[in-house]
Image (spheres, rainbow, N blue to C red):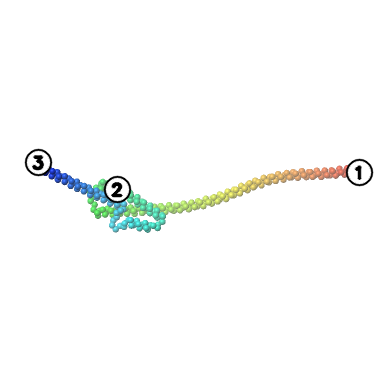
Amino acid sequence: MKTSQTNQADNKGREKKEEEEKEKEAKAKKGEEGEVSWRSRIASLQKSDLLGLTQPAGTPRPQASDRRDVEANAGESETMRWARERRERRQVRARRKAQRTGESDDNDPSGEEEFSGSGLDPQTDQHLSSRSVASSNDRTQGGEPESKDFKKMFEDVSRENTQLQSQLQDTQRVISQTRLDLEKATQRQERLTDCSAMLDLERKDRRMLERRMAELEEELKVLVDLRADNQRLKDENGALIRVISKLSK
């Protein structure tokens, strides 16, 4: 009987110890889950603050302002639209960079221990979110001078493009005028070539005429001599006829 009673007492003691250990494990699990939930909540708040998803009370909603901006800028020119798109892309890159920085801060174990040990309340969360929104607004305001710089650069490029277009037009006019001058010079050269050919023909004709004239002069001299000989022969013939007539009488 005593042995059975001692065994029952030992069993009860073991059961109590097991129950106490289970309660301790359950409490530890709850504490860990609460700590993990706080850490995840803090990380999500930091990410949302860096992405600009949270905002303090009294500030306008960014989606409505974006819609108003889109409606107001619907009639803008292509230049302003291009500058706005460039500015938005830079803001997105800045947000992504800030998000990567925030994720690296979340992965820091010392930071997690600070936030988990501090036991932040909702007021502290709101203060943190408002401070992150203010920093994001500062980054947005800091991007405005960059957008102005891009606008100035675009104006400079447009001005330079206009100057290049005017220079191109001037060059085209000079090329057209040079082409006309070249055509005129070519025609003049052709006329000069024709004139030189005609002069050569005239020289040849003149030489031929000079030779013909020399030949005719020679023939004329021969003809004069022949006429003189003919006249002399006629005179001699007449004298002979007279002598013969006298002798016949």
- Mark earlier in primary sequence (2, 1): 2
Left or right, 3 with respect to 218, comes to left
Is any atom of residue 237 visible in this view? Answer: yes
Is any atom of residue 149 visible in this view? Answer: no
Mark 1 belongs to which amino acid?
Lys
- Mark earlier in primary sequence (3, 2): 3
Residue lying at 29% horizontally and 50% vertically, measured from the top left: 47
Residue at mark 3 to residue at mark 2: CA–CA distance: 64 Å
Query: Closer to us: mark 3 or mark 1?
Result: 3
Mark 3 belongs to which amino acid?
Thr
Residue lying at 62% horizontally and 48% vertically, measured from the top left: 194
> Which dot marks residue 51?
none
Residue lying at 31% horizontally and 57% vertically, measured from the top left: 60
- Indicate the position of residue 10 as horizontal and vertical percent values: 12, 43
Given residues 216 and 79, the one toward you in this image is 79
- Where does label 1 land, which residue? 249
Which element is circle 3 on? Answer: helix
- Where does label 2 land, which residue? 103
- Mark earlier in primary sequence (3, 1): 3
Given residues 101 and 170, the one toward you in this image is 101
Pointer 3 local density, CA inside 10 Å: few below 14, some 14–19, many at least 20:
few
- Indicate the position of residue 222 as horizontal and vertical percent values: 76, 43
Which element is circle 1 on? Answer: loop
Mark 2 belongs to which amino acid?
Glu
Residue at mark 2 to residue at mark 1: CA–CA distance: 170 Å
Query: Closer to us: mark 3 or mark 2?
Result: 3
> Which dot marks residue 3?
3
Q: Residue furthest right?
A: 249
